[in-house]
Image: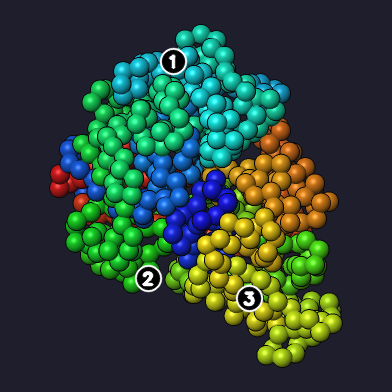
Amino acid sequence: MTILRRLAPRAGRRLPLAAAATAGLLALAACGGGNSQAAAPAGSEPRTGGALKVSFFPDNPVLSCIDPFQVYWIEHRTIIRNFADSLTDQDPKTGKIVPWLAKSWEISSDGLTYTFHLRDGVTLSNGKKVDAQLVADDAAGWVATVAATKGVAYGSSYVQGLTGATVVDPATVRLHLSQPNSSFLQATSTTNLAITDPAEYQATPADRCTGKGVIGSGQFVLDHYTAKVETVLTKRPTPYGWPSELVQNKGAAYLDKVIFTYVGEDSVRTGNLVSGAIDIAWPRNPFTVQDTKLIEKSGDTVEQRALPGVANTHFANTADGHPLADPQLREALYKAIDVKTYASTVFGPDYPVVQGVFNSTTPYFKSESAKLAYDPAGAQKILDAAGWTVGKDGFRFKDGKELTLDYPVTQFTAGAELLQAQLKKVGINLSLRTLTPAEQSTYLPSGDYDLTSTYFTRANPGALQFILNPDVANSKALANRSASPEVIAHLQGLFKQALQTTDEAQISKAYADLQDYLIDEGISFPLFERVQMAGVSSHLHGFAFTSESFLRLNDVWKDNS
């Protein structure tokens, strides 16, 4: 659907760029929130057994895949989190990296070497010992997959600069980078760098996507993955006792089986939850106000947490000849967009308002709300000063040319039309142009747009460089057109300051400066936060989100098993 396959798209109405340009119903918007767990009845003890039934949005129509290193599909990263552990974990409340399969680590002063000391007694579900050699072989597999897929595999963005690994002793492995990358430690907490049986790397990337031979060290085992139909996890048959410190249950899973199905209609998923046919309804778009009321009236709950990473954000085409090459127009655009009304109108009165280019759960997040304040009078004043006068139909003209912004969409939506109406109030004609299937993959490279949008899910602000840094961006065309060469060079310098240091204070300052710069220079235009919601049965306990707002099953049990 779009050339940015690595942008962790949210399917259907939320595919990145082209579909994200539909402005509203494409990507999941956000609320704040943190880790959440459904309370068990007073005095009750967790019960073992039973099958958990989860209904997801439909499977990825472009790349059906369950291989950890390659997957960007959020639902499948949730599944992977529960059968494959990682070297580290990330606290969803603080963003802190904590031990998991590695009990400790050191980072060299030059940021080029990460030494991990592994826990004793950890095994994959097939019995293989998780030792330094296995981790080193996995690292070699990651590097090989980057080469085999020419960097398209989603995990490629997590291993920038990784050259390989050295076995120091059976319990100590050293990973080597060619350049400092302060995001790498957080990368070791993600599903994309989950530790699996390195034998899987003997298969082609395409074969690994089927799940065959993908074996982790988690509480569950991948029983089977039938693309677009169902995915089933079963309780690990061998002992388990090495969870992250972030979970309460230190042993085997309570559940016997987890069945994930793919259901297209939001109303069907909600109906199945309310009727008791499923235990968790996991939507792409936020629940409607009506569905939320229905779920809560039935005695079930709606859990929610903002997805970390880049919010649903607009990026301008600032190339010569395009209206938004003018910084005055970009300044007016901020004041013309009412993000508060957008959130309440499209998603409901209690929906959180976007505060910056990053969602609020992203480490180093800084609110830019004051700079995003709605000020239509201010926008009109700027446009007046720039020589754009109001003419026919209320739109502005200059030198006989109408102030029109070309906004490609895959379909008309309430969000896109609301944005169009907001801009019309100040005299800007936001032209909603429906893309043909062929145009959906060509409009970015050709520069046939004035405004587009995308996002990126990762609990680290370094994710933004895969949108805006031309050296590593998924779409170099979008990155290069988002600002002038001078501005891009300064932006790259800020990324470098944040990524090529081990000094926490320097990292924090660089990301704060970056967030200011993105708004001050008119590079990024946040539209809405993205939130992961889940309808959870009243019979379910221990529900929890990970730092990336995926579902963690360690503590989950049912009182009607």
User: Mark 3 against mark 2, which lies toward the viewer?
Assistant: 3
Q: Which mark is residue 131?
A: 1
Are there few (<14), some (14-19), or many (20+) residues within 10 Å of tag 2? Answer: few
Label 3 to label 2, Cα distance in Å?
A: 29 Å
The residue at the point 58 percent across, 62 percent down is 439
User: Mark 1 against mark 2, which lies toward the viewer?
Assistant: 1
- The answer to whether mark 3 and mark 2 are in CB contact below 8 A is no
Q: Residue furthest left?
A: 560
Q: Amino acid at mark 2?
A: Val
Label 3 to label 1, Cα distance in Å?
A: 57 Å
The residue at the point 31 percent across, 24 percent down is 125
Q: Amino acid at mark 3?
A: Ser
Q: Quadrant of residue 370?
A: bottom right
**First in residue order: circle 3 vs circle 2:** 2
**First in residue order: circle 3 vs circle 1:** 1
Q: Which mark is residue 289?
A: 2
Give the left or right position of residue 149, taking residue 129 as reference: right
Label 1 to label 2, Cα distance in Å?
A: 49 Å
**First in residue order: circle 1 vs circle 2:** 1
Of the pair 288 and 416, the residue shown nearer to us: 416
Residue pointed to by mark 3:
431
| Tag 3 secondary structure | strand
